[in-house]
Image: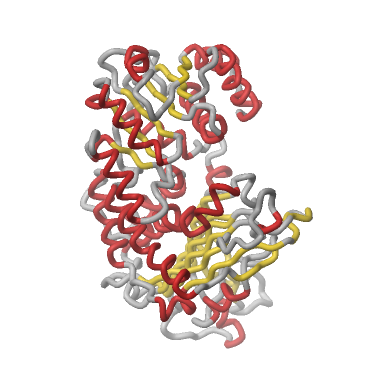
Amino acid sequence: MPAIIVDPVTVALFGALGDLALRKLFPALYQLDRAGLLHDGTRILALSRDLGEPAGYLERIEAALRQRIAEGELDEAVLARFLARLDYLGLDFVTRDGYQTLAERVAPELPVIAYCATPASVFGPICEHLAAVGLAPRTRVVLEKPIGHDLTSSRKINDAVAEHFPESQVYRIDHYLGKETVQNLIALRFANSLFETQWDHNHISHVEITVAETVGIEGRWGYFDKAGQLRDMVQNHLLQLLCLTAMDPPSNLAADSIRDEKVKVLKALAPIRRETIAQHVVRGQYGAGYVGGKAVPGYLEEENANPDSGTETFVAIRAEICNWRWAGVPFYLRTGKRMAQKLSQIVIHFREPPFYIFAPEQRSIITNRLIIRLQPQEGISLQVMTKEQGLDKGMHLRSGPLQLNFSETYKSARIPDAYERLLLEVMQGNQNLFVRKDEVDYAWQWCDQLIEGWSSLGDRPKIYPAGSWGPVASIALITRDGRSWYGDL
């Protein structure tokens, strides 16, 4: 295989002193440099609203890198080379002043990556001013989530961007799509007839998608209380994982071929009406409890909390896809904060054999599951039935894994962070891992019905103790179908 060739670019990072940039983006760019994937001519322009002297801000970026890069991965020579790529410019993002200076700082004729690690409210002004100084024809715009808080606001933001940039130059980030295991989901499904021939309602009984966090809101009360878990996680991360799990095979690996199939899934999602929302959706809010043996406050007791807040920190949904492939197969989605374990996984439950010949008392364990783990340890495990070893065991069965743990199997290879892969794809001009405008529209349309249903019913979230797996009602959601959440302790 030939080495990846990446042409030189200028990365203009808006919001360069924010948490995302310091915690994720600069470390990801450093790792790309360390792997030899940044061209010698690539430069990084850190843009922030702070108007002070550049030297002090560049020192802050260096300090953040030293803090967040693992000791064994911090190479002083690479760090020096990386820091030499950096420049800093104080800029008011929403006014024209300063953008001409920005245009003069970027290398002439080279592609520009305008990474908007900012609130979505300034996406439009940034794009307008980039176009005004003549940078639009060679600029790829990267937009961070969330894009709006409902369908109307999302369309307003996307339309403001589209006034100056065609869809082919817009890269909407969902960092879950950059995870190694998510990429392997496509390979697993479409490169192995073992799975793709079984990937439908005839062979799969149900699917679970769980994204659980042990952390609370981490000082983001102002943002999170206006958003909630549905807007923050379901509208993007969980629905993207659902699409990749459920979509039909694309005709090829081109960006629009993949995204066309994802849109078909979103359009086929069955609407959840007001009269059935209580049976299909559970919303919760964490109370005080214990996480990792440490006492933690409830959501309403967090710093700067509004004690009357009805914002959800947990959502569980029983969704259905109305098409030939998935008719009658429920998809159980679950996400929450202050949960028992940090866990992101997709569990495919295959149907039981049509006729059972083994010991009756073992019938409940006869099942095959494909477990696709995104975190904490990325890997794929297929649960299969085998006979227990030993002369005295007869035909006694056991369930065990055929397992691929990426960190153990590829011990010599470092698993890249999702942002490393996504930044590299933008530099190469590949849109495969990015979300198209119509995907955002259909995802918001489906989520808006749930928000409207809760509002019209006056539904308040159910309290669950921090350190648990959510409200009891979320267990009932799946047990009504004679099932249980996989792996809950």
Looking at the image, can residue 224 be seen? yes
User: Colour scheme of this structure image?
Assistant: secondary structure
Q: How many marks?
A: 0
**Residue 451 higher or lower than 414, as above or below:** below
Q: Residue at point 29% right, 22% down?
A: 111
Q: Position of residue 156 (x, y in %)?
A: 31, 47
Q: Residue at point 63% right, 65% down?
A: 469
Q: Is residue 353 left or right of residue 157?
A: right
The quarter of the picture where residue 99 lies is: top left
Q: Residue at point 48% right, 30% down?
A: 15
Q: Residue at point 26% right, 56% down?
A: 261
Question: Which of these two is toward me, 372 or 142?
Answer: 142
Question: Which of these two is toward me, 70 or 50?
Answer: 50
**Residue 80 higher or lower than 149, as above or below:** above
Q: Is residue 84 left or right of residue 5?
A: right
Question: Which of these two is toward me, 150 or 217?
Answer: 150
Quarter placement of the C terminus: bottom right
Q: Position of residue 315 (x, y in %)?
A: 52, 65
Q: Is residue 305 left or right of residue 37?
A: right
Quarter placement of the N terminus: top left
**Residue 336 higher or lower than 156, as above or below:** below
Looking at the image, can residue 413 be seen? no
Q: Position of residue 332 (x, y in %)?
A: 47, 69
Q: Position of residue 443 (x, y in %)?
A: 35, 58
Question: Which of these two is toward me, 447 or 49?
Answer: 49
Residue situated furthest bottom in the rendering: 360
